[in-house]
Amino acid sequence: MPSALVSSNRDLAFPEKKPASPVLLPLALYAFLFACALAVTLKAARIRTLPAWRRFLPLALLLAAAVMSLLRGVGIPGPAALLAFPLNLTAVALAGREIHANHAHKPLP
């Protein structure tokens, strides 16, 4: 009888670990990439020497891509499959180009 008591106490102290969900890793990767893209587009939006449309175009494209991706959750996968990835790439490329061009034109101290 005491051995059954010890084994049940051990089971309570050390519960069996469950493996992580297979959806968790891609979701975390997507969230990380979206956060990086958002940081780059916000950095481009803070460049005051650019016209307003050039500052906020990458951010608008990124938000449009996020809306397209959210449409997949409500059962409309067509626009997401067609437009979300190209809009994300375009937003990051435009923001990176504006940041690079701004750093190239800054005078050295």
Image (cartoon, rainbow, N blue to C red):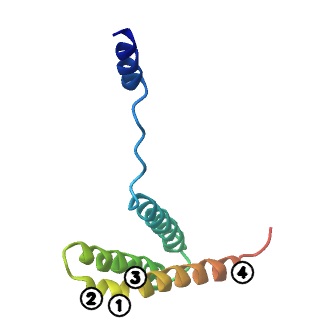
* Residue 61 disc label: 3
**For the residue labelled by badge 4, is the local secondary structure a helix, a strand or a loop?**
helix
Q: Out of 37 and 1, give the one closest to the viewer.
A: 1
Query: Of marks 4 and 3, which one's residue comes earlier in the chain?
Result: 3
Which of the two discs, 3 and 2, sits closer to the camera? 2
Residue at 40%, 82% in the rendered image: 61
Q: Quadrant of the N terminus?
A: top left
Q: Badge 1 local density, few (<14 within 10 Å), some, or many (20+)?
A: few
Where's residue 93, x and y in %? 55, 84
Where's residue 28, x and y in %? 45, 60
What is the distance, in whole Å, between disc 1 and disc 4 at their CAs? 34 Å
Q: Which residue is mark 2?
A: 78
Farthest right residue?
109
**For the residue labelled by badge 3, is the local secondary structure a helix, a strand or a loop?**
helix
Q: Which residue is mark 1?
A: 82
**Cβ atoms under marks 1 and 2 closer than 8 Å:** yes
When the figure is inspected, residue 98 is found, relative to residue 3, above or below; the finding is below
Q: Is residue 44 left or right of residue 65?
A: right
* Residue 104 disc label: 4
Q: Is residue 29 left or right of residue 18?
A: right
| Residue 82, image quadrant | bottom left
Residue at 54%, 79% in the rendered image: 95
The three-letter amino acid code for the residue at tag 1 is: Leu
